């Protein structure tokens, strides 16, 4: 680009207020930066020489200017001839030819740059009233320090405070709930935007800042150094001697790949981590591998960590398959869960009917057990037959209590919990397709309950649960 050469007048601004844009884009744009500009540029396509050919003076109206012919020949302004030393008014979009005709002479368009009002906020900081009480951690009641945000409720806490809360929940085998609203926490990570607000608050009012001793104590407690997906289904069983012993042993549950290079991979500050439901060891959530970490990610990211179960909320992470691919064997100080905790459906084995089968109806479970026995089969035989039917897509999957039911095959990795729920689903289909004459005599004469498997009375009235058949579809309203 070329800047127009000034005529000696004082420049009021150094900003560009207008441009002469050539109609042929191979030539440079002429920028106008002063109120009166003598234009010295190339005028002919036949010669690369630059010469003075006009003067442009800015008018009070930002959209127009006065053009004076300072060249040796006539020029054209919007097809009107402007003789030497004569002038014409040009406005936004005017076409200017640097000679008496279009042949061989360069043409320009007059473009005016929109003016920016002095009061524009583009160069100013926007001041927003802010109450420092809204930047306080609800655990320690002080201004955040190294603030973290939990999801899905989006409440904010000090990293050290929430790390201690997280540690306490894990020790008690409780679900991790938000200390402020009690909603179950699924994710926690550092909030860099709010950390900037935190610093600004201390800059404005340094009296709100904590002592160095308090900050050192908080920093010693923090454990959230990268985004962390939290296992939402903690065991609620009573703690026995083994649990207490495990706590006292102070096992290291940190991620082995955070401190060193393992299998060609090492975590960095932005790595999202997951905590194994079985052994509580941390592991990176990765999308660049083909090892299953969980059922949900396996479907979408070809990775291995979660087993997702829709109805009962199993969204558990398991580290077995992941660490075993790196030949990482657990020790007393560094536990790693067994590969048995998370494996393909075809590799699971079950010797008893799950307690969840037939909607927890023990009478229906006993009938199913007798049917299998009378047929000379084992429970595993029946499960294998129906898994084959599942693979062959012979079963309606609408009621399957697992995420992404249409994608499940015998090779899908699931945890024990989800496997038992899948078996309960298959046993429903086993019973509903079984001819009545193969049922035990006491069960073959029963009438179907109107509400079928969805009957709620069967859960609190044993007589009704035993008297009516509940392994059937609801028919209430279809009589």
Image: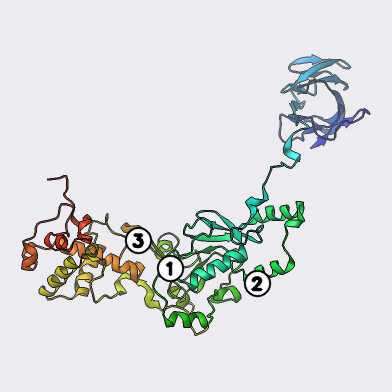
The residue to which callout 3 is attached is 312
The residue to which callout 2 is attached is 220
In terms of secondary structure, where does tag 2 sit?
Answer: helix
* Mark 1 residue crowding within 10 angstroms, few (<14) / some (14–19) / many (20+): some
Q: Is residue 328 visible?
A: no
* Res 58 quadrant in image: top right
In terms of secondary structure, where does tag 3 sit?
Answer: loop
Q: CA distance from mark 3 to mark 1?
A: 13 Å
Q: Which mark is residue 234?
A: 1
**Quarter of the picture holding the C terminus:** top left
In the displayed orientation, state which residue is furthest to the right: 8
* Vertical placement of residue 199 versus 34, above or below: below
Q: Is residue 304 left or right of residue 146?
A: left
Disc on the earlier residue, 3 or 1: 1
**Viewer-nearest residue: 44 or 425:** 425
**Viewer-nearest residue: 260 or 97:** 260
* Vertical placement of residue 43 versus 207, above or below: above
**Quarter of the picture holding the N terminus:** top right
């Amino acid at each position: 680009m070329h800047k127009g050469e000034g005529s000696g007048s004082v420049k009021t601004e150094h900003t560009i207020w207008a441009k002469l844009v050539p109609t042929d884009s191979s030539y440079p744009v002429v920028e106008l930066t002063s109120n009166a500009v003598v234009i010295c540029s190339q005028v002919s396509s036949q010669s690369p020489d630059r010469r003075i050919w006009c003067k442009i003076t800015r008018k009070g109206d930002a959209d127009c200017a006065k053009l004076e012919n300072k060249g040796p020949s006539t020029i054209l302004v919007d097809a009107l001839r402007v003789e030497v030393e004569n002038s014409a008014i040009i406005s936004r979009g005017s076409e200017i030819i640097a000679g008496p005709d279009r042949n061989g002479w360069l043409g320009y368009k007059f473009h005016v740059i929109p003016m920016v009002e002095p009061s524009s906020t583009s160069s100013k900081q926007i001041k927003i009233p802010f109450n420092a009480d809204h930047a306080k951690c609800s655990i320690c009641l002080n201004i955040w320090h190294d603030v973290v945000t939990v999801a899905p409720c989006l409440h904010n806490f000090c990293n050290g405070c929430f790390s201690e809360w997280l540690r306490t929940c894990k020790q008690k085998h409780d679900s991790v709930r938000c200390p402020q609203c009690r909603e179950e926490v699924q994710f926690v990570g550092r909030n860099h935007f709010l950390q900037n607000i935190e610093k600004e608050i201390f800059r404005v009012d340094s009296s709100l800042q904590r002592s160095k001793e308090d900050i050192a104590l908080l920093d010693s407690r923090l454990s959230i150094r990268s985004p962390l997906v939290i296992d939402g289904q903690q065991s609620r069983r009573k703690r026995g001697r083994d649990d207490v012993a495990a706590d006292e042993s102070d096992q290291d549950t940190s991620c082995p790949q955070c401190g060193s290079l393992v299998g060609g991979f090492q975590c960095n500050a932005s790595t999202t981590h997951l905590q194994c439901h079985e052994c509580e060891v941390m592991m990176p959530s990765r999308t660049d591998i083909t090892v299953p970490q969980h059922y949900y990610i396996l479907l979408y990211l070809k990775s291995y960590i979660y087993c997702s179960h829709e109805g009962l909320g199993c969204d558990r992470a398991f580290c077995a398959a992941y660490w075993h691919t790196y030949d990482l064997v657990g020790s007393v100080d560094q536990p790693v869960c067994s590969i048995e905790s998370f494996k393909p459906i075809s590799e699971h084995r079950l010797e008893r009917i799950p307690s969840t089968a037939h909607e927890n109806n023990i009478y229906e479970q006993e009938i199913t057990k007798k049917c299998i026995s009378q047929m000379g089969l084992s429970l595993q035989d029946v499960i294998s037959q129906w898994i084959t039917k599942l693979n062959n897509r012979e079963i309606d999957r609408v009621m399957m209590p697992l995420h992404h039911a249409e994608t499940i095959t015998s090779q899908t990795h699931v945890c024990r919990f989800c496997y038992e729920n899948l078996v309960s689903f298959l046993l429903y289909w086993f019973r509903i397709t079984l001819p009545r004459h193969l049922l035990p005599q006491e069960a073959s004469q029963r009438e179907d309950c109107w509400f079928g498997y969805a009957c709620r009375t069967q859960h609190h009235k044993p007589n009704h649960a035993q008297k009516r058949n509940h392994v059937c579809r609801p028919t209430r309203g279809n009589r």
